[in-house]
Image (cartoon, helix red, strand yellow):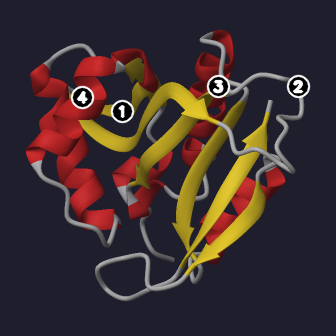
Amino acid sequence: MSTPEPLQNAPISYMTYEKETDLLPAIKLIECDLSEPYSIYTYRFFVHQWPQLCILAHTEEGEKTSCVGVIICKIEEHRRRMMDGYFADDREVLMRGYIGMVAVDKRCRGRGIGRTLVAMAVERMREAGAEEITLEAETGNRGALAMYEAMGFIREKRLYRYYISGADAYRLKLWL
């Protein structure tokens, strides 16, 4: 019988982004997990404008703390499209939340960290007035798609060759 990795059983704590030193471990995790390369300025764009929508998951092993999950989001006004010259409820603008990045350390998957991060971010965006939340996920990322759909997101559109790698994505949406 194999000995489990220490991180698999370590308790998880969640914290909101507070300072620049919180960013480096999150970036390292995202770079290991996501196919898209992001510049430091992309991360700073999100965390400096919407720090409350950047949530990190940590484990503690003795005196060592490890970042094992991160979600980075934003919320902004979004101009709606007209249907036959009309808006559904006479409002041209709505508040839209956006999940830009989610990553969970492979050694800690299956513990509900991703689901918890998404649920926390969705609740914070709802409290901030979001009426819908969107994100993109690779069409081949079955685990992520299953999680998002179980949380109420629906596939709105397929985006062909969306990623630099040439992979397709689904745009998913959650109406609040």
Amino acid type, callout 3: Val
The residue to which callout 2 is attached is: 89
Q: Residue 145 shows which numbered tag? A: none
Is the C terminus in the top left, top right, bottom left or bottom right quadrant?
A: top right
Q: Could one spot residue 96 in this view of the protein?
A: yes
In the image, residue 169 above or below residue 86: below
The residue sitting at 49% across, 26% down in the picture is 76
Q: Quadrant of residue 170?
A: bottom right
Q: Is residue 149 left or right of residue 12?
A: right
Q: Are marks 1 and 2 in contact (CB under 8 Å)?
A: no
The residue to which callout 4 is attached is: 62
The residue to which callout 3 is attached is: 93
| Mark 1 vs mark 2, CA separation in Å | 42 Å
Amino acid type, callout 2: Asp
Q: Of circles 3 and 1, which is in front?
A: 3
Residue 88: x %, y % from top left: 89, 34
Q: Of circles 3 and 4, which is in front?
A: 3
In terms of secondary structure, where does tag 3 sit?
A: strand
The residue sitting at 59% across, 34% down in the picture is 79
* Of callouts 1 and 2, the N-terminal one: 1
Residue 169: x %, y % from top left: 54, 74
Q: Are marks 3 and 1 in contact (CB under 8 Å)?
A: no
Q: Of circles 1 and 2, which is in front?
A: 2
In terms of secondary structure, where does tag 2 sit?
A: loop
Residue 2: x %, y % from top left: 45, 74
Given residues 118 and 107, the one toward you in this image is 118
Amino acid type, callout 4: Gly
The residue to which callout 1 is attached is: 58
* Of callouts 3 and 1, the N-terminal one: 1
